Image: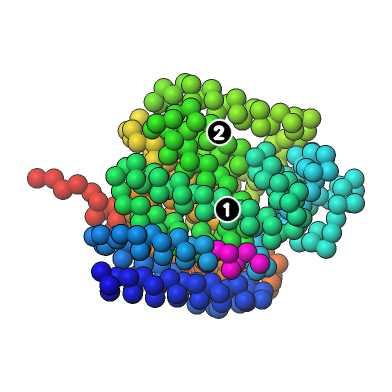
Amino acid sequence: MKRDRLVLLLAGAVLVAAFGGIAGTHELHRRFPLLLGLYGAAFAAYLVALRVAFTARRPGRFLPVVMLVVAVIARVMLIPAKPDLSTDIYRYAWEGRVVLSGANPFATPPADTSLAPLRDDDYPLINHRDLATIYPPLAQGVFALAAWLHPGVITLKAVLVLFDLATLVALVFLLRARGRPPTHALVYAWSPLVILETAHSGHMDAVGVFFLVLGITLLARRPNAGFAALGASFLAKYITVILLPFLVARRHWRGIVIVTVIAVAGYAPFFDAGPRLVESLRVYSGTWWFNGPPFMSLAGWLGDPLLSRRLLAGAGAAFALAAAFRERDVARYTYLVVGCWLLLAPTVYPWYVTWMVPFLCLYPNRAWIAFTALVMMSYRVWGEYDASGAWVLPTRWLALEYVPFYGLLLVEGLRRRPAHG
């Protein structure tokens, strides 16, 4: 037991030191080898800590306390760091100011001259300034709250980290409700991917993930509150729509009504945008792609990107329907369908993978845990972008990212396959 405590403390120290290095690195997106080195050190410490968490017979209070302290320190130290692996948070901060000004971010893109008085020094960092927002109403509310507290990305990152840590608390309750050791929440608490994408880059996925985990946690004892949380998750990011087949298959009609009412109520203040309410969403779903090998391969083979999107969407929908009728556990269903979405999506940014991490606390999977490290390879795209202006990840980096993942996924599938005879 003393040895486990020492190992856990050392692993926590390495994790914090690695993120300290990331926090102190200027223009991290242009220093890819250093990013991989520091992230690799954090991930190695993470794997050591996972072994302790999953093999400790009587962890007592020590392990949970260390888990929480390290999780908080690693996140807090990254909040002041410049988010230079992604510019999304500058868009969030902008839209928070737009909402506070009384304008409709679904109707008015950043480039609109009517919003010129809101522009500040961060305006040039806003991506896709010609498009109105793609982020749903609850996300807009979070952006506006942070802007009201104090304009700027640091306050917004701090708010997102609070949602992230709230997810950890919800996971502890979910694990306890299912008779699992709460220390298994370390899968999420110390996940280098979650820490980096939330506390450093400030991705708003933390809001949607929190309400998704909260909803699943509440469904067993307080179903109406659980459905309400799922509706809130949809209003933070549309991914929660994957639960619709499950609700239909299990005849949760009240749940469907609750989620629908919450979704409509959330959008009501923005209805004056008219058709523009979903215009940017159509652009994203119809034209954007990045780091999705199945889509890239299929589109190259068929020569028709739109048909490829439809075929993959159809395959994903068929899988979700089959899983909805086969799986009675909403958590396992969500785990399987989120995994399917990540495997088939035309666009797979690293922060998308954070949606899978909470479910690895319940269903540990070596392949998906490894992918939370391998997906860092996709940040090599910055080097290509600086050199050529093309946002395309070279094939060799895709291979380094996905070949080990697919191999591990196959091995895990064969290992878990029930024996016959």
- In the figure, 181 relative to 390: above or below? above
Element at label 2: helix
Q: Are marks 2 and 1 in contact (CB under 8 Å)?
A: no
The residue range painted magenta reads 74-80
The residue shown at (59%, 61%) is: 199
The image shows residue 91 at horizontal and vertical percentages of 73, 53
The residue shown at (32%, 61%) is: 53
Residue type beneath disc 2: Gly
In the image, 266 versus 405, the foreground residue is 266
**Residue 207 among magenta residues:** no
Query: Viewer-nearest of labels 2 and 1?
Result: 1
The image shows residue 407 at horizontal and vertical percentages of 34, 61
- In the figure, 63 relative to 160: above or below? below
Q: Residue furthest left?
A: 421
Residue 162 numbered tag:
1
Q: What's the coloring here?
A: rainbow
- In the figure, 245 relative to 79: above or below? above
The image shows residue 7 at horizontal and vertical percentages of 34, 73
- Residue 408 visible here: no
Q: Which residue is mark 2?
A: 231
Give residue 189's quadrant in the image.
bottom left
Give the quadrant of the N terminus. Answer: bottom left
User: Which is more N-terminal, label 1 or label 2?
Assistant: 1
The residue shown at (66%, 32%) is: 266
Query: Alpha-carbon distance for marks 2 and 1?
Result: 20 Å
Counting the numbered discs, the total is 2
Q: Residues within 10 Å of mark 1 (few under 14, many from 20)?
A: some
Give residue 9's quadrant in the image.
bottom left
The residue shown at (35%, 52%) is: 182
- Residue 159 visible here: yes
